[in-house]
Amino acid sequence: MSSPPGPEGNEQDHARDVKQTEPASALDGSATRFDPVGYIHHHDEQPAATTTTTTTSSSSSVANTTTSGGTAESDTSTETNRDAEEDDSAAADDAVDDSEDLDEESANVRKTSSFYRRRQSMSDTRLQKVLGFPFRPLVRPLTVSDIDSCEALENSAFSKEHAATREKFEYRLTTCPELCMGLFCTVVPSIAAENGFDIETLRTAKPVETGRPDGSLSVLVAHIVSTKCIGDLVTDESMDYPKDFRTNKTGSGPTGHQPQGHTVALHSLAVHPKLHGCGLGKLIVKAYLQQIKGALLADRVSLICQDYLVRYYEKHGFQNIGKSPTQYGGGGWYDMTFIFGNGKGFGNGGSR
């Protein structure tokens, strides 16, 4: 069964807000490259070098217990507490400014732009320090060929009890890859070694292109894995998967992906622990919500999370429906849902 965003069996899907002004990718098999500041680049363009500052920040991470998400299986969001602290800090900074001479709308635009520039600058600084080389991200749909990297990322982000199994990844990436997204980073192995950067997915990464002189690899650093369900909320059946999926191609049955459903059940949101606090969780979550909405794939995105993650998801446009009857991983979950077109959250240009 699938698990809530976060650890599997406790898959905590940690949806984090992402600074982006346009969809980051298309779930039609195309890939889009963009820089951490939110400007989008096609894969054959060279993104601008990441700027570094000495700003320090406290962004929270998204991985196993408090990392990438808040749902049952392996979706955990890793930057909740730090994000909240940044929000408070930015609010304080905005309390006094020179906007008295501006009309109210212009003043609000200025404050909003300044707020996101500060937050992005802090995330960029952390990312540069962790990597030691420019961050060149690529968002694209996941396929079954990414299973080794997904499994490696999942196991690094979550405990064994909470991580999604390889079989679940195989089922979901085979059955509904259009609902699964990966955030990749181009890494030159020799440069990574010089900077002491090593993560599990580096060893499962594939070449950016055949015969590239520097041997650049496309390394998975964050992923979202989902299925569709019939109802409005995540259930034990939607978190499960048919054990005969390799031989039974009819796709019928109450468990697992329901292609006729109108709800995306987000099971796994994972960001590599070494990159927590760098804004990657919010980056992939916003890109994902924008793509689901833009492609008209569903009316809503739902997940289950533990109580300590409820406020986090609410901040990003999810509604708290209350305690969930699901017993995955022992129960204790809360139902959360993000409805497209309700004027709230990421995909609608509303409040965060």
Image (spheres, rainbow, N blue to C red):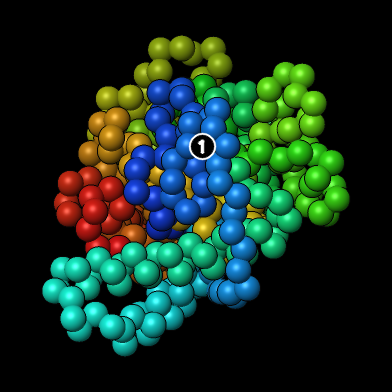
Near mark 1 (Cα within 10 A), the count class, few <14, some 14-19 or many ≥20, is many
Q: Residue furthest front?
A: 101
Instruction: Identify the residue shown where x is 54% and y is 68%.
Output: 122
Observer-nearest of 161 and 71:
71
On the image, the x and y values in percent for residue 243 come to 54, 25
Q: Is residue 337 above or below residue 220?
A: below
Q: Secondary structure at mark 1?
A: strand
Q: Is residue 269 above or below residue 102?
A: above
Q: Amino acid at mark 1?
A: Arg
Give the labeled residue for mark 1.
33
The reply to whether residue 338 is visible in this rendering is: yes
On the image, the x and y values in percent for residue 340 come to 22, 45
On the image, the x and y values in percent for residue 31 come to 49, 29
On the image, the x and y values in percent for residue 139 come to 50, 37
Observer-nearest of 321 and 312:
312
Instruction: Identify the residue shown where x is 28% and y is 83%.
Output: 98
The reply to whether residue 163 is visible in this rendering is: no
